[in-house]
Amino acid sequence: MKLVSLRFLRGIALAATLVALLAGESVATLPSPDFVTLAEKLKPTVVNISTTKNNTALQRRLHRQPSPSLDPFQDFFERFFEEAPRRPQRERSLGSGFIISSKGFIITNNHVISGADEIKVRLSDGREFTAELKGADEKLDLALIKIDDKAEFPVAELGDSSDIKVGEWVMAIGNPFGLAQTVTAGIVSAKGRVIGSGPYDDFIQTDASINPGNSGGPLFNAEGKVIGINTAIVAGGQGIGFAIPVNMAKEVLPQLEEKGKVTRGWLGVTMQPMSAELAKSFGLEGGKGALISDVVKDGPAARAGLKSGDIILEFGGQKISEMNELPRLVAATPVGTTVALKALRNGQIREFTVSVGRLADGGDENNQQPVDDAFGLMVRELTKELASSMGLTESQGVVVTGVKRGSSAEFGGFQPGDIILEVGGKAVASVAEYQKAASIYKKGETVRFLLRRGESKHFLALKVE
């Protein structure tokens, strides 16, 4: 990945400033924080995280084409050794985190510790600890781990990510490429970024250099307060990085500490973005709001009287500018809470009262079917629109839209885009049929799947977890 250095960026800024001064223009300068003092103060609160995982999974390659060898036994031996159980291998990964409690609670990314058999934490002073996983949230990609010691730990202060502005100085500390306690700096280059990583995307974009290994580390503001958790980068993105706003983390931390997981509110609707053409057809100026394309039968929205074609403009007194804002608001609402909302129907604004339900584990507010706990598959009914967006030739059936990390489905070789045709020899043409066919099997039993991948069909066998 190519990255533009901070020195280069500052050189460009200095050149622009000199040009402006020579032209007689007044230039407003952004005061630079004292990064030296900030780094000395904050580095002790940042930790390096390493994990190990025993992997004995079968290595299957369904897409493999027969080799052109003249030896008729070569293909057989290649397939045998590819699919035979391998000796246990120790997978290792590196990441970052930061201490939020003197008692040793640490925030990091879920993908840093997911599936780990052992989590090791190294402090800036060289001390090492074995950490305990206290809770994880796949949807926000957050995890809470804990280390123990008689002495109190240095703590990073959590700030308010709603106060940040584009152009503010920020500093990242982490473990990029295994290089411990690396400090980089830049500015907030955008807010509210949706990058397709989950249903609640609302990332802070920064040009502070973030690389593999920075995941889970803190993004500090000029006051030395954490305003984000570094999470994602864009390949070839010239140093563009993304951080989860710390306010989103603060909302779920109590649940992660107390329950180990997060319970979210649920409205029971399928939503879609509002295009300029759709807004015009509904007589909506500005194209704001969340368009309901479908309503779950007997769900909270259906009981409140909402229908397909309604456009939600306000939820709990907060205006909805775009579709992605509504799932975040609903998810943050406690289950059972009665909320007033406004929606546009047939050109008129109507008021509704909805009692927020509970989002099933693995589900999302856009009506994607929940992960099947038995296998680790996330599936949806394959509509023509979904098939077109995924580049599939089929237009009906059940399509795999996600595979849970560490699940039997992942180890068994399932991939997003696979179309499930049969479960246990029974044809499935809908999500309901899929769930019915899969629900009869008990833990430890093996289930045979027939799926279509590309132009060919394949059988896979999975054990119920």
Image (cartoon, rainbow, N blue to C red):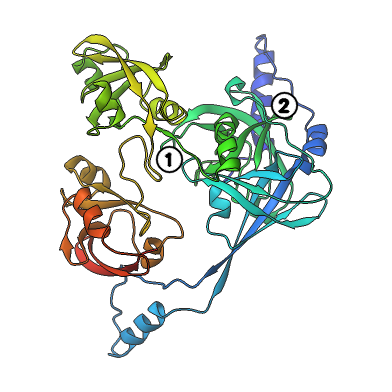
Task: Using the image, tell me which numbered label, if any, was put on residue 373.
Answer: none
**Sooner in the amino-acid sequence: mark 1 or mark 2:** 1
Residue for point 32% across, 35% down: 366
Mark 2 surroundings: few (<14), some (14-19) or many (≥20) residues within 10 A: some
Q: Position of residue 268 (x, y in %)?
A: 30, 32
Q: Is residue 96 left or right of residue 399?
A: right
* Image depth: mark 1 or mark 2 in front: 1
Residue 34 to residue 133: above or below: above
Residue 339: image x %, image y %? 39, 19
Q: Amino acid at mark 1?
A: Gly
Q: Which residue is mark 1?
A: 198
* Quadrant location, the C terminus: bottom left
Q: Is residue 6 above or below residue 31?
A: below
69 vs 111: above or below:
below
Q: Quadrant of residue 462?
A: bottom left
Residue labelled with disc 2: 222
The residue under the point 30% across, 38% down is 367
The local secondary structure at tag 2 comes to: loop
Q: Measuring from the top left, give residue 272's x and y in whole percent.
A: 29, 30
Query: Image quarter for residue 308?
Result: top left
